[in-house]
Image (tube, rainbow, N blue to C red):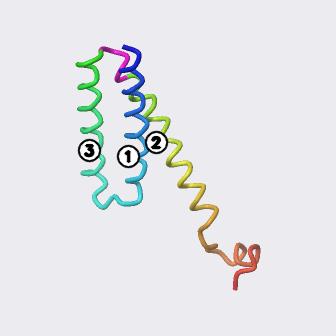
Amino acid sequence: MLISLLGYMGIGLIWGWWIGSLSGKITRPLFDGIAAGAATLMFALWAFYLSGMWAPVLFFCAGGLTLYLHLAWRRELIDRFSLPDSEWERRQYHVR
């Protein structure tokens, strides 16, 4: 039982990272959001059917945490390595 719960948590980690990686590639936000949400819900219901209540709880917790970490990491990379937009930022970073 414990190994299956850890497996669902691991799948949640991978799922959250994958969903976070889609953030820059979305072309139809409503359709893509509904499709990702429906796939997530179907997987959680499947986990509930196979292992009971704790499997989807761990899946959602791990997936949500990983999604948050992935989006925060991408935001940090964009902030760190993007080109400055304003004149003040150009002078601050000595960009001509």
In three-dimensional space, the C-alpha distance between marks 2 and 1, rounded to whole angstroms, equals: 7 Å
Q: Secondary structure at mark 2?
A: helix
Q: Which mark is residue 19?
A: 1
- Ranked by sequence position, the earlier of labels 1 and 3 is 1
Q: Amino acid at mark 1?
A: Ile
Tell me which segment is drawn in magenta.
Answer: 52-56
Q: Amino acid at mark 2?
A: Leu
The verdict on residue 26 being magenta is no
Q: Are marks 2 and 1 in contact (CB under 8 Å)?
A: yes
Residue at 38% across / 47% down in the picture? 18
- Ranked by sequence position, the earlier of labels 2 and 1 is 1
Q: Amino acid at mark 3?
A: Ile
Classify 10 Å Cα crowding around label 3: few (below 14), some (14-19), many (20 and above). Answer: few
Q: To which quarter of the image does residue 27 belong?
A: bottom left
Q: Which mark is residue 34?
A: 3
Task: Name the residue nearer the viewer: 16 or 41.
Answer: 16
Between circles 2 and 3, the one closer to the viewer is 2
Residue receiving disc 2: 67
Name the side, left or right, on which 38 lies relative to 12.
left
What secondary structure prevails in the magenta region? Answer: helix
Image coordinates of residue 60 in percent, x first then y, are 40, 29
